[in-house]
Image (cartoon, rainbow, N blue to C red):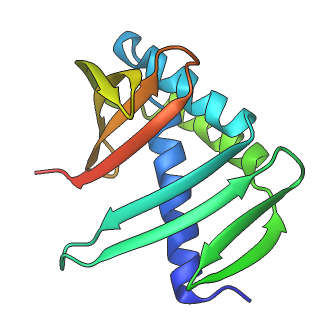
Amino acid sequence: MMTDRSKWMHAITLLALASIAHAGDGSCDAVYRAGIKAVQTPHHLYTHTTARDGMVVTGESIAPGDSFQYRKANGTWTRRPSSDKDNLEMAQDKLRSDPDTCTLIGDQTVDGQAVVAYAVHANQRHTASEVRIVKASGLLEGQTPALAN
């Protein structure tokens, strides 16, 4: 059984992937491709989200490329069926129905890696984030969510 916190972390992860993957206009093509690639590539994801009250919630998940995901919530790891196929389908549906607005921020260096950063505004959810893509691989380096004004 999932705890409220693990449900919340799962929802945040899905929203992050969806907001990354469903950006559809020309300026969002690189963001869209990186989001899809993240779902299709084995990965280790760390999340750090600051709530409105200032509390920082951290999470961690590993998708090794098989049919399972491993998530850490409240210090405990759990194994569960992977939802990457569902995430990919959801992202593709959102791409067709609700494109985001993306603005190129520019080139940056994060932990010695060359990345390109985009400001992404999820129009339907009224959320904003900065998405960073590693230039060498096209994979996501990270996403920093923020509340939109």
Q: Residue at x 31, y 51 (%)?
A: 145
Visible in this render: residue 83? yes
Q: Quadrant of the N terminus?
A: bottom right
Residue 49 located left or right of residue 42: left
Q: Which residue is drawn at 47% across and 15% down?
A: 135
Residue 80 located left or right of residue 67: left
Indicate the position of residue 87 as horizontal and vertical percent values. Answer: 67, 46
Indicate the position of residue 114 as horizontal and vertical percent values. Answer: 39, 19
Q: Which residue lies furthest to the right in this view?
A: 66
Q: In this view, does 39 lie above or below 101?
A: below
The quarter holding residue 10 reads bottom right
Residue 123 vs residue 143, the one in the foreground: 143
Residue 15 located left or right of residue 44: left
Q: In this view, does 9 lie above or below 67?
A: below
Residue 127 vs residue 35, the one in the foreground: 35
Q: Which residue is drawn at 81% across and 69% down?
A: 80
Indicate the position of residue 3 as horizontal and vertical percent values. Answer: 61, 89
Q: In this view, does 53 lie above or below 70?
A: below
Q: Is residue 70 above or below residue 99?
A: below
